[in-house]
Image (cartoon, rainbow, N blue to C red):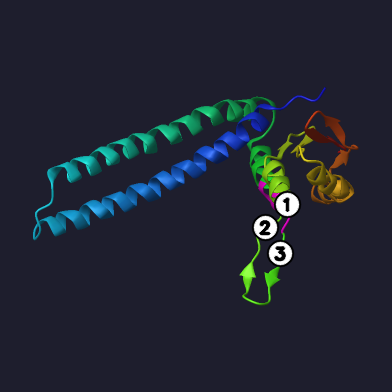
Amino acid sequence: MMKKSYLMKIYNLIQFLGTFFLLSIIFTLIIKLLRKNLINLGESLPLPNQLFQFIEQILRILYVTNLLIPSLIFVLLLQEVFLRLINDSLINLGKSIIGTLRFRKFLKQYQKAPVNDSDNYMLPKNEVILKFNKEVRKSVIDLTNKQLKLLIKIPKEAQSQKILKEYEGQIKEHISSLYPDYLISTFERNKFNLWLIGTKSK
């Protein structure tokens, strides 16, 4: 039975935290700009003190958030970095992160929304494609000096699974071309996870 590596367990959480941190920074800048404009406006118009107190409270929460999230990311990554330094290489950690982003982009499906000629109204996106993309964007590649592991989340809907099944051969070929130093196995399914394992050939 295939087991997730530590990187596979934390990758999506780190990505979520990173996105949340970026949004928090942007929101902080917006609130600070709003506060500055309100202070300038307050010189000519009377504004309630409660409004400024509310903004200051939001900023305090954002400052704490902007401090806690990077700290949490650092703690989560610390174990992975330590394991890489002891047993592998930090270069492979970087390759794993970049490889995962590239693979998710490769696997993502695009559905051109049909247009109604009468009023140019864009119809809703294909639900099957949306559900497929939602699951496969959780895929993770973990590279070490000895092994390559690719984990793909299998969609629960039959139609989305069909799309993935049709792409299995292309996925294996794609991974083999990107990482020629690894001998790639056949796909192995474990519940709603699809595994592809590569063994270092050199």
Give amino acid for label 3: Lys
Q: Which numbered dot is residue 112?
A: 3
Residue at 84% of width from left, 43% of height from top? 181
Q: Which numbered dot is residue 125?
A: 2
Residue at 62% of width from left, 35% of height from top? 11
Residue 128's x, y, as percent? 74, 49
Alpha-carbon neighbours of circle 2 within 10 Å: few (<14), some, or many (≥20)? Answer: few
Give amino acid for label 2: Lys
Residue at 81% of width from left, 46% of height from top? 159
Give amino acid for label 1: Ile
Disc 1/disc 2 C-alpha distance (Å): 8 Å
Q: Which residue lies furthest to the top in this view?
A: 1
The answer to whether the residue labelled 1 contacts the one labelled 2, judged by CB atoms less than 8 Å apart, is yes
The quarter of the rendered structure image containing the N terminus is: top right
Residue at 55% of width from left, 36% of height from top? 14
- Tell us which disc is closer to us: 2 or 3: 2
Disc 2/disc 3 C-alpha distance (Å): 8 Å
The answer to whether the residue labelled 2 contacts the one labelled 3, judged by CB atoms less than 8 Å apart, is no
Query: Mostly what secondary structure, the magenta segment?
Result: helix
